[in-house]
Amino acid sequence: MDRDAWTAAAGSVRRHAALHLLLAGALFLGAFELAPALLGELRDRLLPQDATLVYLAPAEYLLLRFRLAGYAALCGLALTAGLDAWVALRGRLAAAPG
């Protein structure tokens, strides 16, 4: 792999940075809205049946929602940037002679 291929991949990711950030923002907002349902499902599956009191302060609950949404956004950003770089590298290497 030559340096030009990696430069092309980095340039492709930079050119599409706004698209990547828009997708990450959409994933963050979507995951933030779906976090209560996910937390409720996790509570039902992971807590023992005889648990009587599990309490999160409102600030802790909000921070947990932010954390889940942030993880979703970071995963989406890494996935789209990786795919963009892979497509650029594949196109560059396919065009290279040899």
Image (cartoon, rainbow, N blue to C red):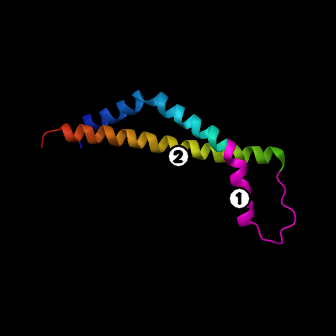
Evaluate whether residue 2 shows in this view: no
Residue drawn at (33%, 40%) of the image: 87
How packed mark 1 is, by other alpha carbons closer than 10 Å (few <14, some 14-19, many 20 or more), is few
Residue to which mark 1 is pinned:
41
**Amino acid at the residue labelled 1:** Glu
Is residue 54 shown to the viewer in this render? yes
Residue with the mark numbered 2:
75
Which segment is the magenta one?
A: 33-56
Mark drawn on residue 78: none
Please provide percent x and percent y for residue 42: 70, 60
Q: Residue at x 74, y 60 (%)?
A: 43
Please tell me in which quadrant of the rendered image residue 82 appears. top left
Query: Under tag 2, what secondary structure?
Result: helix
User: Which residue occupies 58% across, 40% down?
Assistant: 27
Residue 50 shown in magenta: yes
Q: Give coordinates of residue 76: x percent, y percent.
A: 51, 43
Nearer mark to the viewer, of 1 and 2: 1
Q: Nearer the viewer, residue 95 or 59?
A: 95
